[in-house]
Amino acid sequence: MDIGGTLTKLVYFEPKDITPGELDQEAKILRNIRRYLTKNSAYGNTGHRDIHLQMDDVVIRGRRGSLHFIRFPTSEMLSFLRLAKSKGMAQLVTTICATGGGAYKFEDDFQMLVNMKLAKFDELDALIKGILFTETHNPCECYYWENANEISSTKKKFDFSQPYPFILVNVGSGVSVLAVRGPDNYKRISGTSLGGGTFLGLCCLLTGCETFEEAIQLATTGDHKKVDKLVKDIYGGDYERFGLPGELVASSFGQMHLQERRQSVSKEDLAHAILVTITNNIGSIARMCASNEKIEKVVFVGNFLRVNPISMKLLAYAMDYWSKGTLKALFLEHEGYFGAVGCLLQFNGELHAQVGDLLT
């Protein structure tokens, strides 16, 4: 599990090779757990399995099977623990591999409510290992956007078999930026508190929406130009001396000091403006980090990018435009699940013999 500030990600490995030990009574409980997790796409009101991300024919610790990817709001952690207990997970599993800040925050809850211990792993170590494993085992994992500033932009596969060096921008509740020069050679070089959590929080505050999906849907039909102040609003056109196009945002929310402007904007416009503000800030930091480190590939991951092509295309366009084509913005299909995958790969301690490869 990767227990983030906003979203918890759970990776479940389902072996397809049945062992003799899985035929006894204890294994019956295990099979019921497996059936529940793999035959459903929703768990309660807030848990979801991303069926389209499922990876089959994967070998982990000598067993071949499928990887399933499940997410739920971290705010629902206690509901998750009650569900885990009701489905019998607590009867078999004694240890869960976990990363993220929530691995520390909820450690006592796991112990008290379901008698489970958390084997904690550093989230950046897990992130890198998860990315490298997933990219290696999924030939269509890495992609980029061609003609990102146009309506006809297309998603294209990118060969990431020679990845190093690259800048890794992990956009969760906040943002961390890493320079990665090898599988064990990386460092955190920057970050910002303005991330996906900021986007969702501001959208809930200003538009009344309640979920990330709803916020993105609002932003899809909005127009940030009714909220932001553009270069042309100040100069009447382009600022040619410094190569600033008139359509560039000069001041995020810069028109909202005017009462008539505030009265004319919609919830959709506000959501779009928030999205553009957060995305532009992330893109600016990523570009400066890439320039400072002299690295040309910039990989964006994290659940902020889930169902969010607007931000991906903005980032792709910004990287290409401001670097004059020298920087490449890359994206990964499994977005925010790499930390949980990395946990699964790193654990070498004592899990129950029947479930060690199953629940992480």
Image: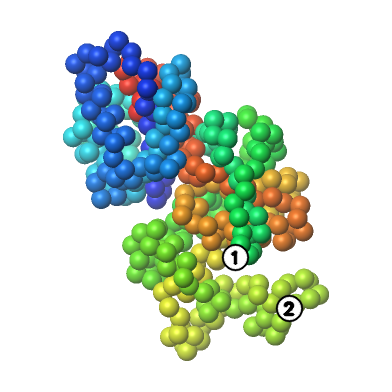
Task: Give the numbered dot on residue 137.
Answer: none
Quadrant showing the C terminus: top left
Residue 113 location (% of width, % of height): 22, 34
Residue 39 location (% of width, % of height): 29, 36
Q: Amino acid at mark 2?
A: Asp
Q: Is residue 297 visible from the viewing direction of this image?
A: yes
Q: Which residue is mark 1?
A: 151
Residue at left offset 51%, top offset 83%: 257
Residue 51 location (% of width, % of height): 39, 41
Count of numbered tags: 2
| Quadrant in which residue 119 is drawn | top left
Q: Which residue is mark 2?
A: 238
Between disc 1 and disc 2, the foreground one is 1
> What colour-coding does the image apply?
rainbow
Q: Earlier in the sequence, mark 1 or mark 2?
A: 1
Residue at left offset 62%, top offset 44%: 157
Question: In the image as oriented, which residue stretches furthest toward the right?
Answer: 241
Q: What's the CA distance linking mark 1 and mark 2?
A: 22 Å
